Image (cartoon, rainbow, N blue to C red):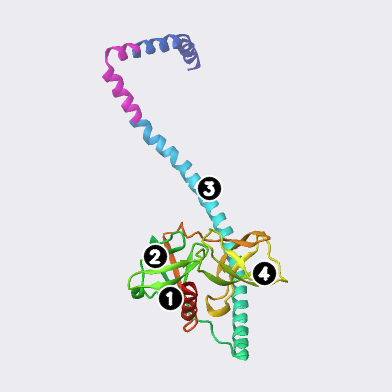
């Protein structure tokens, strides 16, 4: 048998190159004469190889999915650990808050502290600017029907812009802090130095009636002091922008020319704000 196989093997090796050339030539002839036959053969080869490729791709996809699942499990474990730690911190704060709440309640009972008044908010659109050479005020599309009343504070953006001075059924007028007739008591800086913010129809109202033994500086914040019951204490107003021999100027936190809406705040201080507003109006008339 080996004697027969050896000549056949040598013959195949000798003529294999010629066979490859012949097959190549045959394929070239077939491709040039009948394109449909070549397309049919190509389609058959694709049909045969596609299932094989899909079969080979399944283990690869499985491994990729396994790696993804392992990575996601590791991330979930880390997230779970972080959430546990955060939950422990929150529980500690919760217990602390409960202790402070109980302590606060005990101190309130001990001091017989009167609760702070309630607060209501009314948001209204600015519909007109009645400002002129001597008046700085705006009109809003809300009135008595919406619960607007005289003396309510008008806020825009980050601070106070004025107060309600006239109320109709469906509209109201807001006297701005920059108006010549506007006067509100304020506190300056962390030391809460008392002063009065006086409008003079300029963009930055003046700071008046600062105590002679107290100094104010550029950058100090201005907020309502609560004196006289005009406004509650702590409403943000502005910051001192200028200090010179003539006095100090305050740059307001909110520019009344920008917002389309104003937020009216009713701090439910009956019997205080309205008479003060009336007295301011009467002083302006005189």
Residue named by callout 4: 190
| CA separation in Å, label 1 and label 4 | 30 Å
Secondary structure state at the residue bearing disc 1: loop
Q: Residues within 10 Å of mark 2 (few under 14, many from 20)?
A: many
For marks 2 and 4, give the CA distance: 34 Å
Secondary structure of the residue carrying numbered label 4:
loop
Residue 108 in sight here: yes
Tell me residue 150's x, y (percent): 43, 75
Q: Residue at x 28, y 24 (%)?
A: 40
Q: Residue at x 63, y 84 (%)?
A: 103
Tell me if I can see residue 88 in this picture. no
In the rendered view, would you say 101 is above or below 71?
below
Nearest to N terminus: mark 1 or mark 4? 1
Instruction: Give the number of the mark in front: 3 or 1.
Output: 1
User: For residue 150, which numbered disc appears in the image?
Assistant: 1
Q: Is residue 225 left or right of residue 20?
A: right
Instruction: Name the mark nearer the viewer: 1 or 4.
Output: 1
Q: Quadrant of residue 124?
A: bottom left
Check whether the beta carbons of the residues at disc 1 and disc 2 lie within 8 A of each other. Answer: no
Measured in 3D between alpha carbons, the distance from the residue under mark 2 to the one under mark 3, in whole angstroms, is 65 Å
Q: Which residue is mark 2?
A: 139
**Front residue of 227 and 181:** 181
Q: What residue range appears in magenta? A: 28-46
The image shows residue 164, relative to residue 14, as above or below, that is below
Work out whether mark 2 precedes mark 3 in sequence or the reverse, and give the earlier one.
3
């Amino acid at each position: 048998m080996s004697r027969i196989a050896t000549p056949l093997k040598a013959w195949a090796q000798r003529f294999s190159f010629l066979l490859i050339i012949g097959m190549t030539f045959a394929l070239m002839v077939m491709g040039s004469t009948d394109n449909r036959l070549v397309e049919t053969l190509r389609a058959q080869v694709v049909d045969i190889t596609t299932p094989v490729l899909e079969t080979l791709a399944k283990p690869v996809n499985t491994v990729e999915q396994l790696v993804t699942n392992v990575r996601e499990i590791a991330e979930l474990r880390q997230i779970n650990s972080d959430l546990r730690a955060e939950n422990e911190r929150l529980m500690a704060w919760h217990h602390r808050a409960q202790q402070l709440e109980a302590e606060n309640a005990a101190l309130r009972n001990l001091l017989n502290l009167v609760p702070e008044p309630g607060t209501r908010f009314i948001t209204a659109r600015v519909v007109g600017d009645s400002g002129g050479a001597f008046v700085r005020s705006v009109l809003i599309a809300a009135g008595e029907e919406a619960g607007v009343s005289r003396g309510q504070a008008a806020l825009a953006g980050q601070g106070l812009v004025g107060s309600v001075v006239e109320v109709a059924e469906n509209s109201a007028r807001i006297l701005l802090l920059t108006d010549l007739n506007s006067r509100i008591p304020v506190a300056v800086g962390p030391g809460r130095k008392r002063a009065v913010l006086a409008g003079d129809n300029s963009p930055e109202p003046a700071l008046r009636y600062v105590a002679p033994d107290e100094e104010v500086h550029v950058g100090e914040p201005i907020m309502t002091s609560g004196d006289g019951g005009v406004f509650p204490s702590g409403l943000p107003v502005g910051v001192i922008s200028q200090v010179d021999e003539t006095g100090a100027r305050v740059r307001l936190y909110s520019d009344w020319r920008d917002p389309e809406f104003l937020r009216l705040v009713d701090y439910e201080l009956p019997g205080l704000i309205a008479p003060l507003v009336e007295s301011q109006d009467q002083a302006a008339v005189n």
